[in-house]
Amino acid sequence: MEHRIIGCGNAARGDDAAGLLVVRQLRAWGADALEHSGEGLSLMESWRGHDAVIVIDAVVTGLAPGAVTVWDGREAPVIRDGGRSTHAFGVAEAVELARVLGRLPARLLIYGIEGRGFDLGSAPSPEVVAAAEHLAQRLFRD
């Protein structure tokens, strides 16, 4: 089974770097993981041809910073972040369009790391850095 791990985000926007932090750590340990901006149409192309896909991105759902939530992208609609996305067409929209077009991978898990600060030029919060490290360890073990 072809699998792909994709970390989405923008390293220059604080906690938006969450997915990138995870995949960078995975790659440091020798895992195959892809950094992605999170732009929806390109994201759909990046999982093309892969049966099992994990997408990691920052989210804003109201939970404590650093909280990790996982969604089965094939079973339930992906929660939008209330307009805080740095993309007009991001992860949630890519999943829903892929669902309509019949282009979802056979298995799609989406990990959201709760962020709180997304200012341009800011560093990720300590909670997000810790959560990204923990999630990278978890995914590497699995």
Image: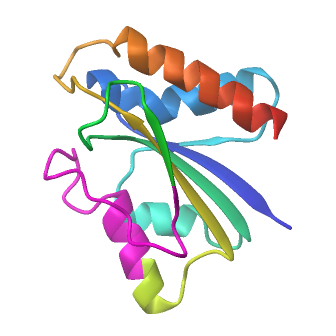
Q: Position of residue 136 (x, y in %)?
A: 66, 29
Viewport quadrant of the C terminus: top right
Identify the residue at horizontal 58%, vertical 48% (top origin): 6
Residues 18 and 68: in front is 68
The residue positioned 79% from the left and 22% from the top of the image is 29
- Can you see residue 39? yes
Pick out the residue farthest to the right: 1
**Residue 122, relative to residue 72: is it above or below?**
above
Task: Say left or right for 82 vs 60.
Answer: left
Coordinates of residue 133 in the picture (x, y in percent): 60, 19
Between 134 and 32, the one lying in front of the other is 134
Magenta stretch secondary structure, dominant: loop
Residue 133, compared with residue 99, is above or below; it is above
Magenta stretch bounds: 71-97
Please, is residue 40 above or below residue 8 in the view? below
Residue at left offset 60%, top offset 65%: 108
Image position of 137 (left or right of 78)? right
Q: Residue at x 50, y 31 (%)?
A: 20
